[in-house]
Every structure is written in C-alpha cells, then in structure tokens.
Image (cartoon, rainbow, N blue to C red):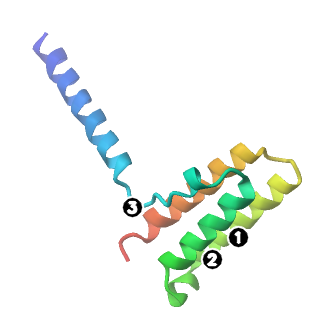
Amino acid sequence: MRANRSFSLVLASCLLAGCGYEYHRPTQTGCEESTQTFAEMEGCLKKAVASAYTAREQASPDVRLYYIKADDVAQRVRKDLVSEFNGRVELRQLYVDLRLKTEGR
C-alpha cells in the first residue's frame, strides 16, 4: 500500500516537472502560432534558425542537415506526399531536435 502511494507521488511529480519543462523550453519560436500555412511556417523557422546561429554555426553539419531535411519536407508537402499538417509537425520536430543538439555549444 505504501509503495503504491510512493509510486503515485513520484509519478505525479515527474509529470508536473515534465509539464514545466515543456512550457519553458528554449526551442519555442512562436512560428506555430503566428503562421497558418506550411510555407509561412517554413519561412518563419528558417528565419529563426538564421537569427539563432552565427554564420560560422550555420556552416556546422547540424544546421546544414536541418536545412536539407526541411527542404525535403517542403518538397514532399508541395508534391502532396505529406499533408500540410504533418509537414508542420515534421518541421517543428526538426527545429526542436536541432536546438536540443546545439544548445550546449
């Protein structure tokens, strides 16, 4: 009984900590809220990457890979191989992955 209560308390604490972490992540750009189409979001995230990284950092493999993958997603959306919604989700995830990889630099 006591173990169940302790487990529940630990689980609730982890969930609350996770929610707080999600809310304050430095990977948020506002592009999701300020754009309505895939093309607008693509442009917004490219501007966010351009402003977040110096010219030297933009030549890094991680940033270059982001641009390559983002262009691939854009082509798939234009060819109707992926919906705009799923393309926006993919772009967002690529951006988050990039920021998390390069945060410690």
Q: CA distance from mark 1 to mark 2?
A: 6 Å
Q: Closer to us: mark 3 or mark 2?
A: 3
Q: Is residue 13 left or right of residue 83?
A: left
Q: Is the residue under label 3 in contact with that under label 1 (CB below 8 Å)?
A: no
Three-letter amino acid code at disc 3? Pro
Q: Residue at x 63, y 48 (%)?
A: 89
Q: Is residue 12 left or right of residue 104?
A: left
Disc 3 or 2, which lies upstream in sequence? 3
Q: Residue at x 51, y 84 (%)?
A: 57
- Secondary structure beneath dot 1 equals helix
Q: Residue at x 52, y 78 (%)?
A: 51
Which residue is under mark 3?
26
Which mark identifies residue 68? 1
Three-letter amino acid code at disc 1? Ile
14 or 26, which is in the foreground? 26
Relative image position of residue 23 (x, y in whole percent)? 36, 47
